[in-house]
Amino acid sequence: MCLAIPARVEQINGDDAIVNLSGIRREISLALVENVEPGDYVIVHVGYALEKIDPAEAARTLALFAELSAQDSAGEPSP
């Protein structure tokens, strides 16, 4: 199973970017995506941005991940 995570672009360095993944800053490649600007959200998988996404969609996805993490921490079964 593969997992791609929404991340906010903080800084661009040529074909690379520094993104914020829930408070963790990572360098990723932008080689597969065009027209990315700081503040944009991208889907990240294995160190590559796969596509830009709408900020509202990123917020919904991140909220879902947070909810699942909270359930897991509380020992509740996942849906």
Image (cartoon, rainbow, N blue to C red):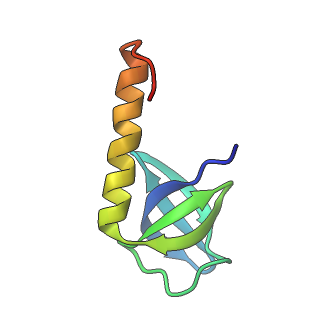
| Residue drawn at point x = 48 percent, y = 74 percent | 52
Q: Is residue 38 left or right of residue 50?
A: left
Q: Is residue 31 left or right of residue 77?
A: right
User: How many numbered circles does the render carry?
Assistant: 0
36 versus 76 height, above or below: below
Looking at this view, name the residue that lies furthest to the bottom: 35
| Residue drawn at point x = 41 percent, y = 40 percent | 65
67 versus 9 height, above or below: above
Q: Quadrant of the C terminus?
A: top left
Q: Position of residue 16 (x, y in %)?
A: 61, 71
Q: Closer to the camera, 44 or 12?
A: 44
Q: Closer to the camera, 26 or 77?
A: 77
Q: Quadrant of residue 73?
A: top left
| Residue drawn at point x = 35 percent, y = 26 percent | 70
7 versus 74 height, above or below: below
Q: Position of residue 25 (x, y in %)?
A: 48, 51
Q: Position of residue 56 (x, y in %)?
A: 29, 65
Q: Is residue 1 left or right of residue 13?
A: right
| Residue drawn at point x = 35 percent, y = 63 percent | 57
74 versus 25 height, above or below: above
Q: Quadrant of the N terminus?
A: top right
Q: Closer to the camera, 69 or 28?
A: 69
